[in-house]
């Protein structure tokens, strides 16, 4: 509460002084019509605001005591919080009184006084409305019910007992709470049976992930700040000689890498073009709309070639400008977008003699729901010895495109026009994951198929499928891309790391947040926060501290899967899933880690899936995922290789 209360304490005194000045200047001039009520209103408001400022000041002071895992010095905080809550009732009544006085047409007081009261009333209602919204967002209806989750090792056959019924009710309540939140966020989209199934699945995922911790959003922010600084300390340490040698590829591997980088830079244009006009406007903010407006009235392919809405021809016009292709080069374009059904297009690439299937990444609420449908399902292939697990939502999206390409004869039409061309499937983000699974499905029918997945989601394929795809899929990852490291085991590992570092830090949370913001914006050396881990032996470090245990209500099933071998008959709900194919990792070389750095130079190397087994915290963990950054990095490496060849 320290930072929100402090911001209120900073803003309220100015308002209080203004009302006090207004009351003092016009103290003897309240004999106008409605002046009696105005006198009582201003006097009561001065006393009320003074009480609120005192309560908030006490709230700030008490909130700053102790640490995240040591709430003892803050034991008086609930009383102060309830006091502030009680003050909302007279504040609401005074806001109503002020609104009534302002709306009274019979009031004949000075215009300055009326304007001052109007400003005060508006400010009061703004504060009340934002307070209600804030409470609705952060309020947890479950409250202390999380502690009723059964501890690990308890009997699982409790459905008929009172404890089992209580556990079932709490889990159901938690799932319903998350489902209502998701429905509220997606209230602007048309909801059908697929949406309802997805809402329930995603709600269950969030329930299982957040049910075992007692952390608030500011605790998570503090943990991310501490992890980032700890990570930067580790990166500044000199590397072991063995670690340096393992990244020294042979000339044959380097030649292969250069060829793939040149191909990736070419096909990334198609993956970026699949985003349509939003990407084109984002990368050309000053000229895009003018250029698109000039093309909106030109001829376009017949309606049978295009599915979905493309008002004013903006999407297709953007695709033409980004790829540099002609109208006749496009076989099929789909802008249709629903949950598990994402846009894509099929085009002829005469430069590389390829039929390109480009799948769009995440750009709508429906796409986000597809991303978050992270349950696992089986994908059985004859060539793979073991049955593979895949991401459920992305697999359903790949199935949709597969049916369109095969059942609707789109690929047959393309190969009828260009029978000697090869098939290439590309996509970025969600499109990259969908393209990878689609390539697996089409591999039997098109043995020479190639797939380029740019920044695909990390939790995509099981180990057997990931190894199988190394023959025909290339994944391209830039820097510390968050999405390429997203998987349920990695998220559980991140939660464990946050709990551990937050629980063992001996600094108040407000200091962590303030210093962390300064570090993220202005840089400098990482703070050396003292922790309870300092001075402990290696054996002791493997045991959780009391503070750490206090923040973990219980362990979720996926959390347990990280440290224990699953039983043969009961596999974990979220097994380890990996990136598809061979992986090209592009990192910055000799550049600042700050967002505003310029003159960035990139280097690329072949990598493996274990490098992406942990989420890295960085200001660029989001920007490194953006399609324009990926394209910029690939173009930089491709141009550098071209200049070396010319020399």
Image (cartoon, rainbow, N blue to C red):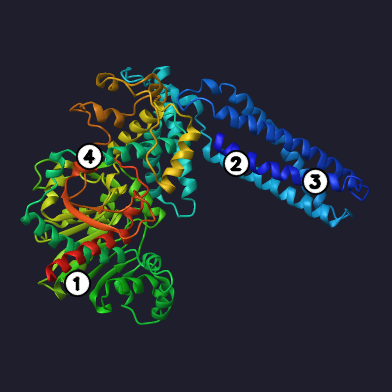
Q: Which residue is mark 3?
A: 21
Instruction: Tell me the CA gap for discs 2 and 3.
Output: 22 Å
Q: Identify the residue shown where x is 32% and y is 71%.
A: 319
Q: Earlier in the sequence, mark 2 or mark 4?
A: 2
Label 4 sits on residue: 238
From the viewer's perspective, is 579 left or right of 532? left
Q: Nearer the viewer, residue 591 or 354?
A: 591
Element class at badge 1 = strand
Which tag, 1 or 4, sits closer to the chain's start?
4
CA separation, marks 1 and 4?
46 Å
Which mark is first along the chain, 2 or 1?
A: 2
- Nearest to viewer (mark 1 / mark 3): 3
Q: Residue at x 87, y 48 (%)?
A: 26
Q: Identify the residue position indicated by label 1 in the image.
A: 349
- Mark 2 and mark 3 in contact? Answer it, CB < 8 Å: no
Q: Is residue 17 above or below residue 472?
A: above
């Amino acid at each position: 509460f320290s930072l929100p209360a402090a911001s209120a304490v900073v803003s309220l005194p100015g308002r209080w002084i203004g009302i006090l000045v207004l009351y003092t200047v016009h103290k003897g001039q309240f004999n106008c019509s409605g002046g009696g009520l105005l006198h009582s209103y201003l006097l009561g408001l001065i006393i009320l605001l003074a009480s609120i400022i005192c309560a908030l000041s006490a709230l700030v002071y008490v909130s700053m005591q102790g640490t995240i895992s040591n709430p003892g010095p803050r034991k008086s905080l609930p009383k102060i919080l309830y006091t502030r809550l009680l003050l909302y009732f007279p504040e609401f009544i005074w806001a109503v009184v002020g609104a009534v006085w302002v709306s009274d047409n019979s009031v004949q007081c000075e215009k300055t006084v009326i304007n001052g009261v109007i400003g005060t009333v508006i400010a009061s209602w703004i504060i009340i409305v934002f307070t209600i919204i804030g409470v609705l967002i952060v309020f947890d209806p479950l409250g202390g019910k999380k502690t009723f989750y059964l501890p690990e090792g308890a009997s699982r056959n409790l459905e008929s007992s009172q404890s089992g019924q209580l556990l079932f009710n709490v889990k159901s309540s938690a799932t319903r709470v998350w489902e209502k939140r998701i429905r509220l966020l997606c209230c602007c989209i048309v909801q059908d049976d697929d949406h309802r199934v997805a809402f329930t699945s995603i709600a269950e995922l969030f329930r299982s992930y957040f049910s075992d911790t007692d952390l608030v959003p500011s605790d998570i922010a503090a943990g991310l700040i501490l992890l980032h600084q700890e990570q930067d300390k580790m990166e500044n340490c000199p590397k072991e000689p063995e670690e340096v040698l393992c990244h020294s590829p042979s000339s044959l591997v380097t030649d292969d890498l250069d060829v793939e980088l040149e191909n990736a830079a070419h096909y990334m244009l198609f993956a970026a073009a699949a985003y349509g006009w939003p990407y084109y406007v984002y990368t050309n903010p000053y000229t895009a709309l003018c250029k698109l407006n000039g093309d909106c009235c030109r001829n376009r392919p017949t309606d049978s070639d295009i599915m979905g809405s493309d008002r004013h021809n903006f999407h297709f016009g953007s695709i033409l400008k980004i790829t540099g292709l002609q109208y006749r080069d496009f076989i099929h374009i789909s802008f249709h977008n629903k949950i598990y059904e994402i846009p894509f297009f099929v085009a002829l690439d005469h430069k590389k003699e390829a039929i390109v299937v480009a799948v769009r990444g995440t750009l709508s609420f429906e796409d986000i729901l597809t991303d978050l449908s992270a349950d696992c399902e089986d994908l059985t292939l004859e060539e793979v010895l073991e049955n593979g697990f895949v991401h459920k939502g992305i697999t359903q999206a790949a199935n949709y495109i597969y049916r369109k390409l095969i059942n609707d004869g789109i690929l047959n039409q393309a190969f009828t026009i260009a029978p000697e061309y090869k098939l290439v499937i590309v996509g970025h983000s969600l499109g990259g994951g969908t393209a990878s699974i689609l390539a697996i499905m089409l591999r039997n029918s098109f043995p020479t198929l190639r797939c380029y997945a740019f920044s695909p989601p990390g939790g995509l394929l099981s180990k057997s499928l990931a190894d199988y795809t190394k023959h025909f899929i290339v994944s391209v990852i830039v820097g510390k891309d968050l999405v390429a490291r997203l998987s349920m085991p990695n998220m559980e590992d991140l939660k464990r790391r946050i709990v551990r570092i937050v629980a063992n830090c001996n600094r108040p949370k407000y200091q962590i947040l303030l210093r962390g913001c300064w570090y993220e914006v202005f840089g400098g050396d990482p703070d050396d926060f003292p922790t309870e881990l300092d001075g402990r032996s290696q054996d002791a470090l493997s045991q959780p501290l009391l503070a750490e245990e206090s923040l973990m209500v219980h362990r979720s099933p996926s959390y347990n899967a990280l440290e224990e071998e699953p039983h043969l008959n009961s596999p974990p709900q979220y097994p380890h899933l990996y990136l598809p194919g061979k992986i090209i990792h592009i990192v910055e070389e000799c550049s600042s880690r700050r967002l505003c750095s310029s003159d960035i130079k990139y280097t690329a190397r072949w990598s493996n899936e274990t490098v992406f087994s942990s989420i890295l915290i960085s200001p660029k963990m989001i920007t490194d995922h953006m399609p324009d950054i990926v394209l910029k990095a690939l173009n930089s490496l491709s141009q550098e290789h071209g200049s070396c060849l010319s020399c």
